[in-house]
Image (cartoon, rainbow, N blue to C red):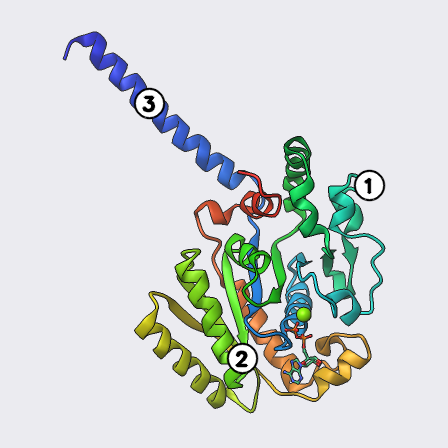
Amino acid sequence: MDQAESLRKKAKERKSQMELQDERVKYVEGNPVLVVAVTSGKGGVGKTNICANLGIALSRLGKRVLIFDTDLGLANIDILLGLKPEFNISHVFSGEKRLDEVIVEGPEGLQILPASSGIEEVTTLSEATRMDLLAQFENLDRQIDIMLLDTGAGIGTNVMYFNVSAQYILIITTAEPTAITDAYAMMKILSTKYQEKRFQLLVNMVADEKEAMGVYRHLAQVANRFLDISIDFFGFIPRDPHIPASVRQQKAVITAFPNAPSSKLFESLASSILSMEIPRSPKGNIQFLWRHVLRVG
Ligand SMILES: Nc1ncnc2c1ncn2[C@@H]1O[C@H](COP(=O)(O)OP(=O)(O)O)[C@@H](O)[C@H]1O
Ligand SMILES: [Mg+2]
């Protein structure tokens, strides 16, 4: 190798090293945001209540939390919390509002981004509009530490989309065989079609931890046998009449009945969320989520 060639080689190595560093700088530049999808195969298993209560518990722990309501159906988080948002993400897509204008403040500093049907309208946006929006969305990440995605139930494309864009997938099931089967079906599709291999399981509406562990063991065993995935036991919430009672008051149980058994468990689950690490991968970057939402790149 002559000297010129060796110099060229060294310069090239330096350049790729710099590029690598640039990537790292880009990664750490923004405030890292933890993104957790709260999802289920079957509907009515408690996702929205779980999002609201975990969100409030995390706010109490000093975190800035945004709940992104991506469920296009009814019975949304705003109703649960007695809020009446005038706008939603579709008004951002149409250019009528800026993102920070449609985010509404919920109890205890919780922030809520209502989606309504907005997500479905993404396909009609021009590439230029999407790029504009992306720039706007990326500037928002500085105000949030944790984002909870309240997804719809089932294996529809939108639901899958939000699960894939999150860093952690929290699967909610009850002990009912139908809910367990649907949770399994969901993990199966997420792993075979979308290469998601790790899941957190929360068993809701059980008598006690023992019943929840039974559900977990059963699911983990079947998954171990037939799917190439790992499931962590994230925790459980007992069946608690305080929850429907709080829903009737349009409040989260943790607000209406702070000493209820479920409220205490929401507090302890919130601490578990605090120990979740933000991955050092594209998914650790909030841009990943917004790119997905906007179907960019
Ligand atoms: N741990 C629980 N104990 C008793 N009722 C619950 C519990 N969790 C949820 N519920 C009730 O189940 C219903 C569905 O909850 P919701 O959060 O709307 O589910 P999803 O968002 O999954 O459709 C609500 O009426 C709520 O009061
Ligand atoms: Mg819901």
132 or 7, which is in the foreground?
132
Q: What residue did someone put label 1 on?
A: 96
Q: Nearer the viewer, mark 1 or mark 3?
A: 1
Residue 100 percent across, percent down from the top left: 76, 46
**Amino acid type of the residue tagged 2 in the rendering:** Ala
Q: What residue did someone put label 3 on?
A: 14
**Amino acid type of the residue tagged 3 in the rendering:** Arg
Q: Which of the image's four quarters has the N terminus?
A: top left
Dot 2 or dot 1: first in sequence order is: 1
- Answer yes or no: disc 2 within 8 Å of ligand 1: no
Marks 3 and 2, how far apart at CA: 54 Å
Residue 91 percent across, percent down from the top left: 79, 46
Residue 291 percent across, percent down from the top left: 57, 43
Dot 3 or dot 2: first in sequence order is: 3
Q: What residue did someone put label 2 on?
A: 179
Residue at point 79%, 58% (across, down): 105
Which secondary structure lies at badge 3?
Answer: helix
Q: Residue furthest bottom?
A: 207
Indicate whether 188 appears above or below 89: below
Residue at point 37%, 73% (across, down): 223
Q: Nearer the viewer, mark 2 or mark 1?
A: 2
Marks 2 and 1, how far apart at CA: 40 Å
6 or 248, which is in the foreground?
248
Residue 94 percent across, percent down from the top left: 77, 41
- 50 sits to left or right of 168: right
Question: Quarter of the image holding residue 41?
Answer: bottom right
Question: What number is the disc on residue 209?
Answer: none
- 138 sits to left or right of 15: right
